[in-house]
Amino acid sequence: FLPAEVLARAGRRETDDRLPAIVAGIKGADPDITLQAICTRLEAMRERTPRGRTRWQPSSVKMLLERAERLGLMPYESSQNQM
C-alpha cells in the first residue's frame, strides 16, 4: 500500500510568465505584427511552446497574448486587433 502523500492530489504547476512577457514584448514593439509572424519570430529565437514543441501555432500565440493581457503586460485592445 502507498503512503497518503503519494495518493494525495498533485498541486498546481507554477505558472511561467516568461512566454507571455516575450510575446507581449514582440507585440508591443510591432503592434501590426500578425500571429503567424510572431510564431516565426519565436521559432527563430528557438523558444519552445508551452508543451515543449519547436513549431509554434497562431492559436498558441493568441492564447499567450490573452494571458499577457490578464497579467497586465499589455493593454486589452492589442491582441483583439489580431482576430
Image: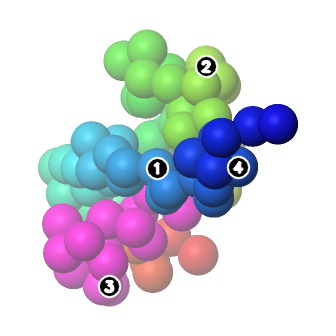
Residue flagged by tag 3: what amino acid is it?
A: Glu
Residue flagged by tag 4: what amino acid is it?
A: Leu
- Residue 71's place in the image compared with 45, above or below, is below
Q: Earlier in the sequence, mark 3 or mark 4?
A: 4
- Residue 37's place in the image compared with 35, above or below, is above
What label does residue 77 carry, if any?
3
Residue flagged by tag 1: what amino acid is it?
A: Arg
Residue 23's x, y, as percent?
33, 48
Does the magenta segment cover residue 65?
yes
Mark 2 vs mark 4, CA separation in Å: 34 Å
Q: Nearer the viewer, mark 1 or mark 4?
A: 4
Quadrant into which the N terminus falls = top right
Residue 68's x, y, as percent?
31, 65
Q: Is residue 71 left or right of residue 38?
A: left
Mark 1 vs mark 4, CA separation in Å: 17 Å
User: Which segment did they paint magenta?
Assistant: 60-77
Residue 5's x, y, as percent?
57, 47
Q: Earlier in the sequence, mark 2 or mark 1?
A: 1
